[in-house]
Image: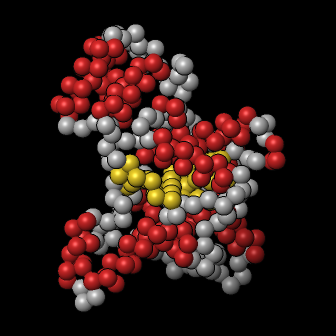
Amino acid sequence: MSDEPSPLHHPKAAPDALLAAALRIAEALERIAPPRPEPFRAEAADAFVWHPEGHRLAPVARVNRVPIGLLQGIDRVRDLLVDNTERFARGLPANNALLWGARGMGKSSLVKAAQADVNARLAGEGGDGGVLPLKLVEIHREDIESLPALMNILRADAHRFVVFCDDLSFDAEDTSYKSLKAALEGGVEGRPENVIFYATSNRRHLLPRDMMENERSSAINPGEAVEEKVSLSDRFGLWLGFHKCSQDEYLAMVFGYCRALSLAVEEERVRREALEWATTRGARSGRTAWQFVQDLAGRMGVRLGTLENPSP
């Protein structure tokens, strides 16, 4: 090996050589560096999915949702959520909302349908008053700790956003609920004025009942033991409960879907088959009704079209 020093280390190395070497190093680092995320543009879509890696909001080309008129048996909670959402879109006071209760009763479907319904009303007014379309941003349960970073991005935009987390719940050792509490109300900056948070859960307090009972039984002060975690639900000013539907409500859902898909059916036969379908699954819900109608359409040889614009 030569003992000759590198030209760059030579005491008389030319400044041009040093500059050229620095440029080569900079170019190499640029090539291996991850690409810079594109600036967020809310105009790109009606809905986005948050990806915490790189702090990226991915636009959703087509939102998977059904028209709000097809959501049967939840009239009261539907009206409450739509009213809350419309007030928020118009810049009026509104509450974070927790939709909790029975599975398959349309909790997440209602959130997506409410956003579309409110935007349709705003568009029907021709944009009077400078009200911009309402945007929907979905954050996954496992990404809740990154919620403050998402809030900072949305805070700088002129649009108003519904941040939506589906199937939100926390286990005994999970501490990410603290990030949610701070982002909703408790932080120094608090929730941005142009952001509202909607969540769905099978649990009213977002915690398993056995965990709450265990903490109460083993704590020195049972009340304080669970107060911190239960208080998370208090950050939601609007609680909307979804309960198992009655037989009549279930059948109304079935026939509502049949009309939307223009299925020519014999009412008594469909009624009988729909009840048998629910019995074999041990549940009546909007999801069960939709699954039955899919099976029915398949047996009739009818291809399912989109429900975005159903037949009246």
Residue 177 visible in the current orientation? yes
Identify which residue is drawn at 27% across, 83% down. 222
What number of labels is visible?
A: 0
Is 62 on the left-hand or right-hand side of 243?
right
Residue 146 visible in the current orientation? no
Q: Quadrant of residue 279?
A: top left
Identify which residue is drawn at 39% across, 78% down. 228
Q: Residue lying furthest left in this view?
A: 280
Query: From the viewer's perspective, is residue 256 above or below residue 220?
Result: above
Where is residue 41 shown, x and y percent of the image?
Answer: 69, 49
Identify which residue is drawn at 40% across, 9% down. 264
Coloring applied to the structure: secondary structure
| Quarter occupied by the C terminus | top right
Query: From the viewer's perspective, is residue 177 above or below residue 42?
Result: below
Q: Nearer the viewer, residue 239 or 24?
A: 239
Where is residue 260 shown, x and y percent of the image?
Answer: 47, 21
Where is residue 192 shown, x and y percent of the image?
Answer: 64, 66
Q: Nearer the viewer, residue 244 or 198?
A: 244
Q: Nearer the viewer, residue 73 or 169?
A: 73
Query: From the viewer's perspective, is residue 59 above or below residue 65?
Result: below
Q: Quadrant of residue 294?
A: top left
Where is residue 75 shown, x and y percent of the image?
Answer: 48, 40
Q: Residue lying furthest right in this view?
A: 129
Identify which residue is drawn at 26% across, 72% down. 212
